[in-house]
Image (cartoon, rainbow, N blue to C red):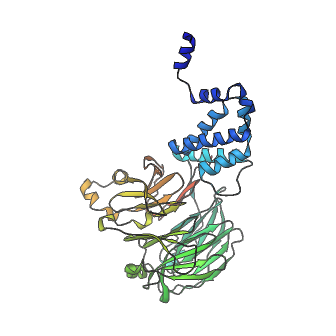
Amino acid sequence: MSSSSSRRSLRPRSHAAELQGEAGNGGGVWPEPFVEALARKVALAAADGGGSLAAAPAVVTVFQVCSTWRTVSESEILWEALTRYVWDKTETTRRTQSWRDEYIRLHLTASNFHRNKAKYTSIEYEVSSDSSGNGVGAACRCLALSPGYLAVGFFDGAVRVFSLTSKECVSSMKPEHENRLGPLSRAIAGIVIYERTVVFASFDGSVFVGGILSGNVRCAHLGNVVNDGTLVDFTGCERFWVGLYAGIPGHACHIWDAVTEQLVFNAGDITDSEALRGWHLLTEQAERIGRVRVNNDGILLTATRGKLAGFELQTYGLPPFVREEVALDEQELIVESVDVNKDRFLTASVNGAARVRRITDFEDVCGFSFDEVADNNSTSTASSSSNNNNHNNRKVLGALNTWQAFLCVDGAVHAWDAHSGVLLHRLDEQMGEVFDLVADDEHVAGCAVDTGIHLWSFRP
């Protein structure tokens, strides 16, 4: 063996060089499906090791092997597969002209989230003419996001829908129904928004369906506070609507078939210990008693400060348990922090610990502490030990998207990596006393008592 060939064998080779060597001069005759399969394998390996953002540079390395392999970069079959595998997208349609463009859009959006590159908007709206007569003014209470719209529910019973493109109000709905057993019985408990339909429910248990573009609204279910208690949270999807009640033992969960609008389940005891607090919500602004969230696979997550439970919603009748967990005193849940995204969910506890877990088995994905950011946000001169004794007084709200977990602690929103638990950044704007926080894979939104509606768009 010559000395020159020995030197070549000892020289380190890049990944691209290894691929080039494997392809050799015969790379041009390799079947296109083989190259596509190799590109998918490289992308998935990179994503598993370094996150979704690492997949694109790895795939580019494959395309650099030779000109023939570069032509595979135009394959729509490849980019559709990469979009589904790397970004965990199950939608059958894309939002751009090609799957390659769709992949690029998702990559740039995720990069914007990671780098905290957002466009901030403070959304303005008109106050209802009778909002001052209900004792709470026009304060926002809850939010819901869809790919095109942001829906906002108010204490006075109104729901306004804003375009995420123009930031303008496209419809305003305020059903005419009387106050029942308290001035806050009309307050909006929760909102479901899909396509061009918005479904929302009030504290008195009434459920309404409205058209986003038309602004028309109708009552799908008339509430009965005396028999069911106060509706404290409401969520759902195109298949199910779910309401969480407190006030009457044994009536915690109500489930509707979203297609027929028929009530198919009315039972549960998760809020039985919160009955008195449920009645108080009709007369006074107070912290949330419970949360309900539904993921894409029809798993329902219910939470109070003392209990967390998951259910399958595939069949009617009593939903089977996925898992149930009772919190210890020092680990009581902060109800406002609970959120679900796909197969994971976020919780935060009064002891300053937050966790992202799998919804199917409650196993940890990652965990992190928000004590440090809470102390940094505090303007109090109290000692650290005093702050630790006042965990219960913190206002903490949570939201979860595909990539990040967001916690709004005392009006400031911080982001953690939802897979590693690493603290990434803090959103620049302070909101004040916040009532709700939501996030999807393009936006983060919050509503506050004095500062209104806040929207951060991470679209490229």
x, y percent for residue 179: 53, 84
Q: Position of residue 317 (x, y in %)?
A: 55, 81
Q: Residue at x 37, y 54 (%)?
A: 370
- Left or right of 217? Residue 189 is left
Residue 135 is left or right of residue 90, and the answer is left
The answer to whether 334 appears left or right of 40 in the picture is left
Q: In this view of the protein, which residue sits in the foreground, 403 or 154?
A: 403
Quarter assignment of residue 178: bottom right
Q: Judge by depth and name the residue closer to the eye, 447 or 209.
A: 209
Please name the residue shown 57% across and 68% down the image: 298
Q: Position of residue 365 (x, y in %)?
A: 44, 54
Residue 400 placement (x, y as % from top left): 50, 57
Q: In this view, does 420 lie to the left or right of 195?
A: left
Q: For the N terminus, give its image quadrant.
A: top right
Q: Which residue is drawn at 42% across and 77% down?
A: 270
Q: Residue at x 41, y 57 (%)?
A: 355
Along the line of sight, the residue nearer the viewer: 298 or 448: 298
